[in-house]
Image (cartoon, rainbow, N blue to C red):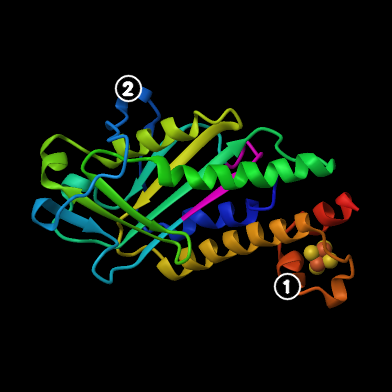
Amino acid sequence: MNLYNSIIERVSALCGRTAPKRWDYDPALAWPDAGAFELVMQRDQALELGGGGKPSVNFTCVTTDPRLVDRDEILVYGPDLRELKADTPFLRISLLRVGDIESDDEDDTEQAFRAIQELDFVKYRVFPKGYMIRTSSDSDREQVRVSKAALRGGISFAKVGAAFIKAYRKNPNVLAARVIFVTDPGADFAAARKCAKDVKDITLSLSQILKGMPTDCGSCNLKPICDEVEGMKELHFGRK
Ligand code: SF4
């Protein structure tokens, strides 16, 4: 699965000008999960990430290339939760290395598409305590309200990232996960939005190909995407 590789290669350049802080994944580090959506009232809020009109972007990419995602880790560009003094722009990106979820077999290709969707949906099933996530697949935004109690209890991006990786690693297709948090105001949010749009376009194209399409690229409305994304044409014609 190399459809998203060119996007993954653009990620580190858009995350900001400073070197990231890095943690290896340790399941014991994972921040406790509330088990279901938990409201953080405004009066209990310490700060908001990506709220109040601040930029906010979220996307997930999968790859089978171990050079692009070599281990389970958490990267943080910019101040961590306890260092933030005010609401901030926010970017969270998940890069996942998966096993061979794709082949020329039609059923397997469909299975690959379902696997990609399933991994994207993990974000709707992670509920860190005192860390209320509001995410929208339509706008590619992810806003977070962090409670005062969670900050007092020692929440950090390393712990929230470990909670995400723990959820991703429940899926047997996932071999490694890198979760990236960005609060650096110097990050390129326009480039991040473009990456999020490209991810969505590729996944949508994959879904349309799976539904069955003609194979005349000259008259196909997906041509601009297929021209840009390595592996898309092979995937379509491989199915034929
Ligand atoms: S490979 Fe050609 S026909 Fe198939 S989706 Fe892409 S542009 Fe359309």
The magenta span reads 59-68
Q: Position of residue 167 (x, y in %)?
A: 44, 33
As drawn, is 3 to the left or to the right of 17? right
| Residue density around tag 1, few if under 14, some if 14–19, many if 20 or more, within 10 Å | few
* Residue type for callout 2: Ala
**Which quadrant of the structure image shows residue 216?**
bottom right
**Relative to 223, is 38 above or below?**
above
- Between 17 and 204, the one lying in front of the other is 204
The residue lying at 64 percent from left, 51 percent from top is 5
- Between 58 and 81, the one lying in front of the other is 58
Q: Secondary structure at mark 1?
A: helix
- CA separation in Å, label 1 and label 2: 45 Å
Q: Which residue is mark 2?
A: 28
- Between 15 and 92, the one lying in front of the other is 92
As drawn, is 125 to the left or to the right of 145? right
Q: In the drawing, what numbered circle is on residue 224?
A: 1
Residue 63 magenta-highlighted:
yes
